Image: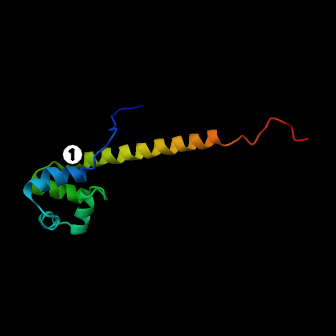
Amino acid sequence: MNTGYTLAKPFHPGGFVRRKIFEPRNLTIMGAAAALGVTRQGLSDFLAERASLTVEIAFQIEKSFGFNAEALMEMQTRYDLTILRQRDRAAQMNLVSKQTSQPSRFTGRSAA
């Protein structure tokens, strides 16, 4: 049962936060991390789309800049689910490909 939608090409919330919140305010990673009270490395990894959004960072963005934490977390959840579905489809296709390319071990002859 499919009750939602998936994005064909998902976007990571780190890019959204970088482009829509930090760049218009000319915030550096160090300045933003200090304003949010989070580590520079953790924020950097998130903005570079190497790490997922944490509840802590989402909450601090909401407190500091007014962007809804739940909406940011939903963005991360949709991104994660889309990536997982893509990986699963690729694994299934790989499995089917391997099964169809391997010769059958059974030739239909009896082993007498």
Tell me where residue 94 sits by quadrant: top right
Across and down, in percent, residue 55 comes to: 25, 56
Q: Is residue 99 above or below residue 66?
A: above
Q: Which residue is mark 1?
A: 71
The quarter in which the C terminus is drawn is: top right
Q: Residue furthest left?
A: 25
Of residues 44 and 39, the one nearer the viewer is 44
**Mark 1 Cα shell of 10 Å, populated few (<14), some (14-19), many (≥20):** few
Q: Residue furthest right?
A: 112
Residue located at (16% from left, 48% from top): 68
Across and down, in percent, residue 65 comes to: 10, 54
Q: Is residue 34 above or below residue 46?
A: below
Across and down, in percent, residue 7 comes to: 32, 38
Q: Is residue 33 above or below residue 55?
A: below
Residue located at (86% from left, 37% from top): 110
Residue located at (21% from left, 59% from top): 57
Type of the residue with mark 1: Ala
The quarter in which the N terminus is drawn is: top left
Q: Secondary structure at mark 1?
A: helix
Of residues 47 and 38, the one nearer the viewer is 47
Of residues 25 and 57, the one nearer the viewer is 25
Q: Is residue 112 left or right of residue 32?
A: right
Tell me where residue 39 sits by quadrant: bottom left
Q: Is residue 24 left or right of residue 78?
A: left
